[in-house]
Image (cartoon, rainbow, N blue to C red):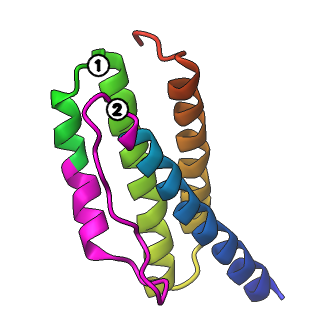
């Protein structure tokens, strides 16, 4: 029964991470110099390597954006939180169940959600 709960939680977190990517893609497109990231899943719901590399490259491109430094850091943090959640899910799939992996993914998702809301609401401060 615990295994079923873990698999269900994994499935839910996987869906959430895919949704986060879509949201991140939209936020990056709204930058003054739009950053385009390809979709993270293909027709078979398999990760697309190009999307991962493009998202990493976006971290460098954000430095050239004509936005405040605090927003640059916020966008970089969003990308890192997505990578954290994604990597924990991939690790769970490859290495097997471990309670901290899904907990870490869920925590990264929560941090992503908070920072994304702050960006959208214009509430990023200097700290």
Q: Which residue is mark 1?
A: 67
User: Residue 65: percent from the left, percent from the top?
Assistant: 22, 27
User: Magenta residues?
Assistant: 29-57
Task: Answer whether labels 1 and 2 touch (C-beta < 8 Å).
Answer: yes
Q: From the image, tell me which residue sits under label 2.
A: 31
Q: Residue at x 64, y 75 (%)?
A: 10
Task: Name the quarter where the C terminus is drawn.
Answer: top left
Q: Is residue 99 visible?
A: no
Q: Is residue 63 left or right of residue 3?
A: left
Residue sitting at x 54%, y 15%: 123
**Predominant SS of the magenta segment:** loop
Q: Is residue 43 visible?
A: yes
Question: x, y (%) of residue 49?
Answer: 27, 74
Mark 2 Cα-neighbour bin, 10 Å: few <14, some 14–19, many ≥20: few
Report helix, strand or loop for mark 2: loop
Q: Residues within 10 Å of mark 1 (few under 14, many from 20)?
A: few
Q: How many marks?
A: 2
**Residue 121 falls left or right of residue 53:** right
The mark found on residue 48 in the picture is none
């Amino acid at each position: 029964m615990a295994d079923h709960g873990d698999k269900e939680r994994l499935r839910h977190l996987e869906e959430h991470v895919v949704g986060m990517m879509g949201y991140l893609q939209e936020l990056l497109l709204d930058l003054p110099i739009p950053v385009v990231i390809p979709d993270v899943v293909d027709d078979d719901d398999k990760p697309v390597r190009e999307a991962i590399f493009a998202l990493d490259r976006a971290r460098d491109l954000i430095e050239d954006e004509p936005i405040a430094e605090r927003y640059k850091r916020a966008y970089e943090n969003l990308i890192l939180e997505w990578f954290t959640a994604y990597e924990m899910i991939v690790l769970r799939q490859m290495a097997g169940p471990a309670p901290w992996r899904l907990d870490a993914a869920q925590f990264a998702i929560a941090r992503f959600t908070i920072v994304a809301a702050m960006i959208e609401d214009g509430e990023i401060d200097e700290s």
